[in-house]
Image: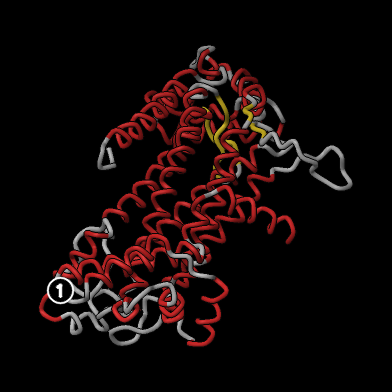
Amino acid sequence: MLIDYQLAEQAAATRNPIYRVFSISETVSWICRVEAALAKVQAARGLIPAAAAQEIQCKAISQTIDITALRAEIDATGHPFLGVLRAWSRELEGDAAQWVHYGATTADIFNTVLILQIRRAATLMLEQMREIETQWMTLALAHRQTPMISRTLGRHALPITFGMKLASWLAEHDRSIRRLQQWLSNYATGIMSGAVGSYAAFGPDGPAIEAEVMAELGLKPPEAADWKGSRDRYAEFGAALAIAARGYGRLAQEIFLLQGDDIREVDEANPGIGSSTMPHKSNPLLCIDIMSRCREVSAELPTLLEWMMTLHDRDSSWQDPSLQRMCQAFARTLDMSRQLAGRLVVHPANMLRNLHRTQGHILAEDLVFRLAPKLGKAVAHELLHATLREARASGISLQDAIAAQPALAAEFDADALSLPPPHHLALCAEVTDRALAAIERRRNDPDGNPA
């Protein structure tokens, strides 16, 4: 319901700092800081008066632009950046307002600010993703040997452990972390090259000015060519975010299914009221929210891809709203995922019960490979397939079906027909350990490189 969505958004905005990265006040503050860095570099080179640069820097730190006045200026000019400049200029003393934004273009400032904002958001995301990773790693380790049934195409497949199921997801999550880390490594600078990237207003010192401004902002040296007309870096960030969000959605969907009353291998432990009319219901609200928000994140990606087709050397396409919505929906996904990991209750007894629901039929593959050296794999497979087909029709267990065929029964000892088969689960624990160790190696690498 809309009211629930609105209340959740308000709570998330208060709780998660990712929301604040793209707020009006933070955006204006970033704009002022970028302009202050430009003024400082230009004053040091004698391009603008030192007093003006000092005033710009001071007011950038203590800027108190009235948001109402800012909206009025934007409405009056029809240009968002000019609105900010005019509102800020009223705060500047002397003739400092004449030297703000000297030689730069709007796209220089907006792209640099957007890079700074995305980098800040991505850093916060990675911090929160690592927290969630730790929660699920702890759970995977605790259940590295907890047997359960795997399911392929909705049907019982082979025995695994709950720890191995989580390890598979954690490996995917690890790749999502490394994608964001790689994006941060690849796109670590802004741009300050003038209207079309030729540094015309800055003169021959333009590239040096740009480099010094980036250094002032804590960014890496500028790229070799102007990229104001290229939007691929934003699309790449959006793609990394969409993939990560869908990963959380995949896990939430799995938990959603596993806690259904017909399976009930895990439980979200929601203490709230599940239904206005059915007192017995306890709904998986966290899973539902994650599954919904992850779709909101990825729904913005097509817009970012469309904006890559800019006109000529630069047009007025802006990705800010889509990126903001993506980041905030992802922040909400992270909030819910952290709560889900903290609240999840595992029911090993129910996992074991479900493991027996097909009456041992899931051992058939293991029996095929026990028979293969003597009969050949294809013959063994056909033999077990026919045996299980009759067992399913009769509603009997694999053990009873084997016992009804003395020649076949003589090929297997008691361990071969017991659930869960120990040799299968030993490898599941090993897979879990390997996955967790790979994540630890990435964590211990200061550069965050893959193991």
Can I make out residue 82 in this image? yes
* Residue 61 percent location from the top left of the image: 38, 60
Instruction: Compare residues 361 and 14 and report the one nearer the observer.
Output: 14
Q: Is residue 109 left or right of residue 7?
A: left
Instruction: Please tell me whether residue 130 is drawn above or below residue 374 in the rendered image.
Output: below
Which quadrant of the view contains residue 3?
A: bottom right
Instruction: Please tell me whether residue 73 is drawn above or below residue 118 in the rendered image.
Output: below
Q: Is residue 264 left or right of residue 80?
A: right
* Residue 373 percent location from the top left of the image: 37, 25
Which quarter of the figure is the C terminus placed in?
A: top left
Judged from the image, the secondary structure of the residue bearing numbered disc 1 is: loop
Task: Give the residue number, with chain letter if any, for mark 1.
Answer: 46
Instruction: Compare residues 420 and 273 and report the one nearer the observer.
Output: 273
Can I make out residue 306 in this image? no
Q: Could you tell me the amino acid type at mark 1?
A: Gly
Residue ranking furthest to the top: 414
Which quadrant of the view contains residue 362?
A: top right
Q: Is residue 154 left or right of residue 445?
A: right
Residue ranking furthest to the front: 94
Residue depicted at x 49% and y 58%? 327
Q: Is residue 30 left or right of residue 343?
A: left
Instruction: Compare residues 328 and 102 and report the one nearer the observer.
Output: 102
Residue depicted at x 12% and y 75%? 205
